[in-house]
């Protein structure tokens, strides 16, 4: 399908092009899940509708409930037609289009009355079920004499709680819980809805089956038929006509009154529209399927439960005791042992609590959605919609809605009947307005419409909507009747609607001027372009672009990071806002100006100004979405992005964010491509994750191994067509085969070993004691520790520890002994201790040196703790010899030391270690020697840590600059004070045992004199022991920075010109650029020669 | 009320009769929808 594109014509060329995707990014659900979501709301009315209706109209009520449920099939048809229309905007816009602004405001007020009351009635009803159960259990305990006498005396009988007050308190508690959930923005899950409905279905099946068996056993009488003679209205049920003469001769009008009191049984039908847009394809068919499931389920559940309650629960207790928890009453009057019935009642209460508390959440989400849409239309000021600083939710609306709900609960004091009457008022008027809007739109709307309520008769050119009209007039007549018969509800409903109507009207007036101004500003700064679906070509970006997600204009550090680290010449940057839309938006798509509202304008204005400060061009995009992660993955797919950058969420860790993106990626439809996700933390740290299947990060030695194997194999005939990939492929096939044969062995082999090295600078510093002490501590913590090799002579304290540990006997090879590597691998301890790495194994051993044994153990997944003295490190041998004058032959390569996961310096101060020397001599020379050896060991340890950091950062794809050892880069020019700079750098390098590099960036057209000066400077650098580098590059700043980053430079020494004003300015700007780009390095500036 | 009630009664019963037709016709349509197989693209 080609996507539709609308563009607001460009009036000014410098406006930023901004694409607004109008189709909500949804994760599609099956019709079963959709039905479950709706039934969570609709099915909850079964818990209170029957009781309320019987209190109002008497024992014949179940017939009216059944009638209402059958009528709900027709109402459902209206909602199916409404969903099948392709209109944008939300309830307010659609009704406004059909009936005008006043009706639209009234319609939204009625809908809000319906939504807001759903919470209190559901919460109070759940509380009534719990309180009723508590009282029943207390009465039961009292009968059995389990209640203390003092309690019985206090309550003058069986202890009990006030059901209404308890219900009110519980309802407030649950409302507050969901208020918090909605402020945080915890999403509704269709899984949860499905699970609740599965449990509810178990309850319904048990309830119906057990009831049928009970009826079979005890016999039954149907409730009196719904004739005017059988109607017995309570005083309250007649409302304003209660004391009129008309009340005595109601006749058929009584039927209407009774129907009006039962109408809340179909409350929740409107939820069908909410889930419509999330339905998987074929949408209309699945909508109808979901609608059929919903209608049948609710008819059976709500209708039959009310009927069975009248047939099974005795008249004497049905209204008096169980009016507010009718299903509990039904459970108690089944045939069977009391304990079983009580247990079933507990089950009913649990199910009731689950489904009713879910309805509270749905009501908050629904109200939030409606008010958000109304706010976007300028009918409610933007103040309401301002997102929460931390969670990004429209918390002010959530506060308003839950505040009104708590107020309603307090005013009702836990009375379900009063709440139910008011609720019915909201439900019927909300349905009536919707039906009226649909009826008018039949004549006014000529766009796409998937389905129409039948029957329709065509007379000439006019089509008469018989079915739709019938449903409307039936609803209107009941709504009008309710005005007269529900006095409290009518008053409350009218007051509520008027208050909301006034708020809407006043807000709209306030907003009008502001809105016009904002619209003008928007047109001035942004060139809005609406797209049905996101297409890369429309946004005009190249494949492999960088997608940056933004939400809060106060936290745009990750955008700055992106602008710093990506060059827009190579990769385009697209800034996307996934605009979260509530439930209500699922019914209708959003209009462009609703999506790109005042808030988005502020957000994008800030975004653009940041990009401008970096001198980089960005593209802007807004996508409406129900799930940010899913929207992000879908957008990245549509735009063929290779990198996605996000800020750290306030609700989850970077790992969790990446996991959610990964989940969304897995759920996304094919074709989908991999991308890299960078999560930028507020402190500037960046975590990188590969989303989707990706190439593993291979170490250079692994690549070398593949290459070595390939070279070796190529020597054999018939191997011309073998490639590196064939070797990897074969290795993987063998691994998967081994994995099938022996999973444990493979997993054990894959378990990563660990190498910890204790580094000493001289013998006698206490390495053996330290290594054995660590082994003792680990053993004490329950780790399986084995000593693989130990020094032949130990001090007494170390020897005492050794006796408490398991020692693997050495193996004889000829006359000599070596560490038993085979046995250690087979034994596979948690930790293996090797005291002394620098030993050459005798010929015929498994490995030539002991450090190779240690390496093999690490590769086998064993944690190795080993010790070595600095004098045995191959690459440091000469340096140490120069200090000590002693030669060693057995060595360990520095690469092995660098491969350690952890290095610990056994750092006894020089004087202390001296006391342990065999001769005990304490000459000054010896002390100096030890101090120098100690310094060397410290530098080596720092070097290893540095190496580890670089490896870690590389593996994580972090291009962050970080170093543990000083590396100084002196940048010279013929004009610089090179001597002064090199000398200063040399002092720093010597002081910190750092590396010194002197670099010069080739300058075209350098004079002969300049060339001579430079040659002298470079010679000076060489004599100071510096490495000299000549760099090339169009931009000297870029050349220096690239070199510095590649060589992990920590300190930059540069010169600063103070020549003519013009040159001074030019160099100053270069210096600024250098400082800006040298993040992570210290920059020292030297004045240049005059 | 005595004047309004008959008008409302007429609307209600007429509306209910029409709604009954809606339920019957859409039920037939629903059965077709449920039995119909989804087209695989």
Image (cartoon, rainbow, N blue to C red):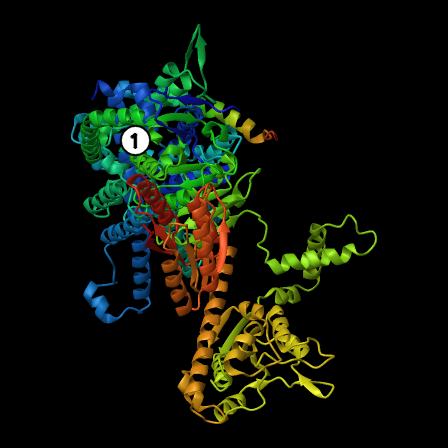
| Label 1 chain ID | A
Whether residue A227 is visible: no
Q: From the top left corner, tell me how far across and down residue A372 is, in percent.
A: 30, 35
Residue A925 lies in quadrant = bottom left
Residue nearest the viewer, comparing A307 with A183: A183
Q: Read off the residue under disc 1.
A: A376
Residue A931 lies in quadrant = bottom left
* Residue at x-position 35% and y-position 49%: A1075
Q: From the top left corner, tell me how far across and down residue A256 is, in percent.
A: 30, 27
Residue nearest the viewer, comparing A653 with A30: A653
**Which element type, helix, strand or loop, lies under badge 1?**
helix
Q: From the top left corner, tell me how far across and down residue A561 is, in percent.
A: 39, 46
Vertical position of residue A874 compared to residue A495: above or below: below
Vertical position of residue A132 compared to residue A884: above or below: above
**For the view shown, which residue lies furthest in the top direction?**
A460
* Residue at x-position 64% and y-position 73%: A852
Q: From the top left corner, tell me how far across and down residue A109 is, in percent.
A: 25, 31
Vertical position of residue A1087 compared to residue A639: above or below: below
């Amino acid at each position: 399908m080609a996507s539709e594109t609308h563009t607001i014509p460009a009036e000014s060329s410098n406006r930023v092009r901004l694409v607004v995707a109008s189709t909500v990014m949804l994760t599609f659900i099956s019709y079963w899940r959709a039905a479950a979501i709706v039934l969570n709301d609709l099915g909850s009315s079964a818990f209170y509708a029957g009781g309320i209706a019987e209190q109002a109209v008497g024992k014949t009520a179940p017939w009216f409930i059944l009638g209402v449920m059958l009528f709900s099939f027709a109402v459902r048809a209206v909602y199916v037609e409404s969903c099948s229309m392709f209109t944008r905007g939300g309830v307010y816009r659609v009704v406004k289009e059909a009936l005008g602004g006043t009706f639209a405001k009234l319609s939204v007020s009625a809908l809000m009355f319906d939504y807001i009351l759903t919470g209190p009635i559901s919460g109070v009803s759940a509380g009534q079920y719990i309180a009723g159960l508590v009282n029943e259990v207390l009465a039961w305990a009292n009968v059995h004499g389990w209640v203390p006498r003092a309690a019985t005396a206090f309550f003058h009988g069986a202890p009990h709680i006030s059901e209404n007050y308890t219900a009110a308190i519980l309802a407030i508690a649950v409302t507050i819980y969901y208020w918090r959930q909605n402020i945080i923005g915890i999403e509704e899950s269709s899984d949860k809805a499905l699970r609740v409905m599965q449990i509810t279905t178990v309850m319904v099946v048990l309830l119906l089956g057990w009831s049928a068996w009970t009826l079979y056993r005890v016999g039954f009488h149907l409730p009196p038929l719904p004739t005017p003679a059988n109607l017995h209205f309570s005083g309250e049920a007649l409302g304003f006509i209660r004391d009129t003469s008309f009340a005595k001769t109601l006749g058929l009008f009584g039927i209407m009154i009774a129907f009006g009191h039962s109408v809340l049984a179909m409350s929740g039908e409107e939820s069908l529209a909410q889930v419509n847009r999330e339905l998987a394809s074929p949408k209309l068919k699945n909508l109808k399927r979901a609608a059929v499931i919903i209608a049948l389920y609710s008819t059976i559940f709500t209708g039959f439960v009310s009927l069975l309650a009248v047939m099974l629960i005795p008249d004497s207790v049905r209204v008096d005791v169980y009016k507010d928890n009718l299903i509990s009453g039904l459970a108690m009057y089944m045939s069977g042992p009391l304990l079983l019935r009580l247990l079933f009642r507990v089950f009913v209460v649990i199910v009731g609590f689950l489904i009713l508390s879910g309805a509270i959440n749905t009501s908050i989400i629904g109200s939030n959605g409606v008010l958000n849409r109304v706010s976007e239309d300028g009918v409610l000021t933007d103040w309401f919609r301002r997102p929460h600083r931390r969670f990004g939710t429209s918390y002010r609306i959530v506060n308003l809605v839950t505040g009104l709900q708590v107020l309603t609960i307090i005013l009702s004091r836990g009375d379900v009947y009063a709440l139910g009457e008011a609720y019915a008022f909201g439900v019927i008027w909300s349905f009536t307005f919707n039906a009226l809007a649909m009826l008018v739109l039949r004549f006014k709307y000529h766009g796409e419409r998937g389905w129409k309520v039948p029957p329709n008769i065509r007379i000439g050119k006019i089509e008469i909507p018989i079915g739709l009209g019938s449903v409307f007039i039936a609803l209107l007549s009941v709504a009008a009747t309710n005005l007269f018969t529900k006095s409290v509800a009518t008053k409350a409903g009218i007051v509520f609607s008027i208050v909301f109507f006034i708020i809407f009207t006043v807000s709209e007036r306030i907003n009008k001027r502001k809105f016009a101004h904002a619209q003008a500003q928007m047109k001035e700064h942004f060139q809005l372009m609406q797209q049905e679906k996101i297409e890369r070509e429309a946004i005009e970006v190249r494949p492999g672009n960088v997608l940056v997600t933004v939400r809060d204009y106060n936290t745009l550090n990750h955008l700055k990071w992106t602008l710093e680290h990506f060059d827009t010449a190579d990769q385009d940057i697209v800034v996307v806002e996934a605009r979260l839309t509530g439930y209500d938006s699922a019914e209708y798509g959003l209009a462009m100006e609703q999506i790109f509202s005042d808030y988005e304008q502020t957000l994008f204005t800030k975004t653009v100004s940041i990009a401008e400060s970096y001198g980089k061009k960005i593209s802007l995009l807004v996508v409406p979405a129900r799930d940010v992660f899913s929207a992000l993955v879908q957008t990245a797919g549509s735009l063929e992005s290779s990198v996605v950058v996000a800020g750290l969420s306030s609700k989850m860790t970077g790992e969790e964010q990446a996991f959610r993106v990964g989940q969304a990626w897995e759920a996304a439809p094919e074709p989908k491509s991999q991308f890299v996700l960078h999560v930028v933390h507020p402190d500037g740290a960046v975590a990188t994750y590969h989303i989707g299947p990706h190439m593993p990060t291979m170490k250079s030695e692994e690549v070398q191994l593949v290459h070595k194997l390939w070279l070796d194999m190529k020597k054999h005939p018939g191997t011309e067509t073998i490639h590196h990939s064939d070797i990897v492929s074969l290795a993987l096939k063998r691994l998967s085969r081994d994995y099938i044969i022996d999973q444990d062995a493979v997993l054990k082999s894959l378990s990563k070993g660990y190498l910890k090295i204790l580094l000493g600078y001289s013998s006698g510093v206490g390495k053996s004691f330290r290594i054995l002490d660590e082994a003792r501590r680990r053993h004490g913590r329950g780790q399986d520790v084995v000593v693989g090799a130990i020094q032949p002579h130990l001090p007494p304290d170390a020897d005492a520890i050794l006796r408490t540990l398991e020692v693997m006997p050495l193996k004889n090879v000829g006359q000599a002994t070596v560490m038993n590597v085979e046995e250690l691998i087979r034994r596979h301890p948690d930790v293996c201790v090797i005291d002394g790495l620098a030993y050459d194994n005798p010929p015929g051993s498994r490995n030539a040196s002991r450090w190779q044994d240690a390496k093999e153990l690490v590769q086998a997944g064993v944690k190795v703790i080993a010790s070595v003295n600095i004098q045995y490190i191959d690459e440091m041998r000469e340096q140490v010899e120069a200090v000590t004058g002693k030669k060693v032959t057995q060595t360990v390569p520095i690469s092995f030391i660098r491969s350690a996961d952890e290095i610990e310096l056994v750092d006894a101060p020089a004087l202390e270690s001296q006391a342990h020397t065999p001769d005990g001599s304490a000459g000054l020379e010896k002390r100096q020697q030890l101090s120098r050896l100690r310094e060397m060991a410290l530098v080596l340890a720092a070097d290893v840590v540095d190496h580890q950091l670089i490896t870690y950062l590389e593996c994580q794809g972090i291009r962050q600059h970080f170093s543990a050892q000083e590396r100084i880069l002196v940048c010279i020019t013929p004009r610089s004070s090179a001597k002064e700079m090199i000398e200063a750098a040399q002092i720093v390098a010597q002081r910190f045992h750092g590396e010194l590099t002197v670099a010069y960036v080739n300058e075209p057209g350098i004079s002969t004199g300049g060339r001579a000066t430079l040659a002298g400077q470079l010679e000076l650098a060489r004599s100071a022991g510096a490495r000299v580098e000549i760099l090339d590059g169009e931009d000297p700043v870029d050349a220096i920075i690239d070199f510095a980053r590649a060589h992990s430079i920590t300190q930059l020494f540069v010169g600063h010109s103070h020549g003519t004003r013009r040159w001074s300015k030019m160099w100053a700007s270069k210096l600024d650029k250098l400082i800006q780009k040298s993040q992570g390095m210290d920059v020292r500036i030297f004045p240049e020669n005059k | 009320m005595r004047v309004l009630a008959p008008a409302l009664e007429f609307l209600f019963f007429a509306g209910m009769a029409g709604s009954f037709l809606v339920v019957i016709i859409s039920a037939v349509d629903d059965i077709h929808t449920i039995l119909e197989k989804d087209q695989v693209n």
